[in-house]
Image (spheres, rainbow, N blue to C red):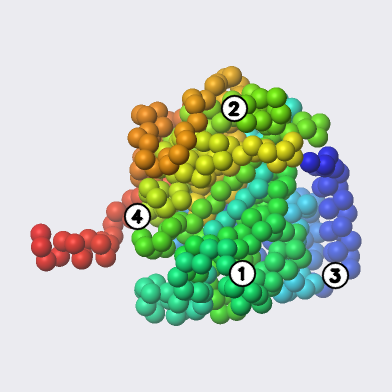
Amino acid sequence: MTRSPSPEAIRSDALAHLRQYADAHPHGNVKLGIIDSDGVMAGKYVSMDKFRSALDGGFGFCDVVFGWDSADVLYDNTQVTGWHHGYGDATVRLVPESWRPLPFEAPTIFVQGELDGRHSGICPRRTLARVLDQGAAKGFATFAGFEYEFFTVAETLESLQSRQFQNPKTYGTGGFGYSVIRNSAHADFYQGLLALCREMRMPLEGLHEETGPGMLEAALTVAPALQAADEAAAFKTFAKVYAQQRQMMISFMAKWSEKFSGQGGHVHISLWRDGKNLFHDAAAPDGMSLIMRQFIAGLQAKMAEIMALAAPTINSYRRLVPGYWAPTSSQWAVDNRTAAIRAIPGSAKSTRVEFRLPGADSNPYLALAGAMAAGLWGIEQGLTPPPPITGNGYLITPKARDRLPRTLWDAAQKLRGSAMLRAALGDDFVEHFAATREWEEREFQKFVTDFELKRYFEII
């Protein structure tokens, strides 16, 4: 891993570039965006004069985007935002280094922001930054890489809605994982997405067919952790845009059908210092350093407490079933994809931890923040992990300590009761996010599913 320029130098260069851009396009517009609790990007166009002002002093954005759910229904149980605050403006400060070209809107660019002031505690980006700062205070530079499995449909949202999302026209039929035939036959779609990701500064290091109709997987290039999460959030948004511009749809929901494997959002993590990967120790068993083992021990011990960050929707728990390439407990293993934590031995460059619990529906900032908080806690406590599992993890009955919550409600209670997460992420974040997950469960409980109608209507 080459040494990166300092964050201050990167921000300074980006700010100078954006000022030059504004001067060169005085009558243009800029698209600004922020990521909400669900990982959804909210934003708007602003004039160039407004953009210049925002570069200097930020701008206001109605805090309702953190006060409603993904269907724009207002929460009734949050404190930082709500009717009791009148849904005023949250202060947003721009992140100059997050700017990206928008090839399909040239010369317009996109710039991301993050919440400031009293709302900063519930901002996903600021939450991740706080955890990374805690690691930096211990001398750790964190690098991360996100990979997403996603579902691709060869029809529009309106078409899907007309059939209540039943029998989608998948982009390809049957399972054909890693198919060269499919990615060659669909080369225009593949090459266009790869090119978009390069041009928008969120490059992919891999893109391939997954097993299942319409299933693809994209691996984003490893980067400093906060940058990696920015790129992941941008990818999830603009991959959807890319598909919809072609009368198609991409979905990152965790499980779209009980017949097929779900969609993961795995996170690869390594800790560095002075250009050295601290997870690598050629003299240690499996080439894994003491720090790496302590990180794994913390992640395993606290996985139930960070569950809501990795599995944040009702649908998340449909994915976490045996035999479908998703973990069902907090067990760890060496290069074994049946475990929640896959330790990947390798070279001094490639040794890392893969956190396989998060689904594609997870907010990248929060999935990484939870993993980092738990891993850093393990290092601080000097923990030693139990022996890794071997063989088929689905056939191993997990110990009580390794069992994970089976519902979003239970995961929210684990989050709310976590002293470790309150210390690492802050009380405001824990209270707010736990409340939003409880709301999600309550909303779900209002509805009668097709399963219930088919199973109970006649016979009970």
Q: Nearer the viewer, residue 42 or 76?
A: 42
The label number, if any, that marks residue 443 in the structure image: 4
Check disc 3 and report its element: helix, strand or loop.
loop
How far apart are the two marked residues, 3 and 2, measured between alpha carbons? 54 Å
Total tally of numbered discs in the picture:
4
Residue under pointer 1: 180
**Residue type for callout 4:** Glu
Position of residue 158 measured from the top left corner of the image (x, y, whole percent): 46, 79
Q: Does residue 148 appear anywhere in the picture?
A: yes
**Which of marks 1 and 4 precedes in the sequence?**
1
Q: Residue at x 47, y 44 (%)?
A: 338
Return the residue found at the far top. 382
Q: Rate crowding at label 4 as few (under 14), some (14 to 19) or many (20 or more) other CA atoms within 10 Å.
A: few
Label 1: few (<14), some (14–19) or many (≥20) C-alpha neighbours in 10 Å: few
Residue closest to the far front = 391
Q: Name the disc covering residue 293, or none.
A: 2
For this view, does 375 lie left or right of residue 287? left
- The residue under label 3 is which amino acid type? Pro
Spatial separation of the CA atoms under disc 3 and disc 1: 46 Å
Give the CA separation, mark 4 to mark 2: 40 Å
Mark 4, secondary structure of its residue: helix
User: Is 451 or 91 nearer to us in this picture?
Assistant: 451
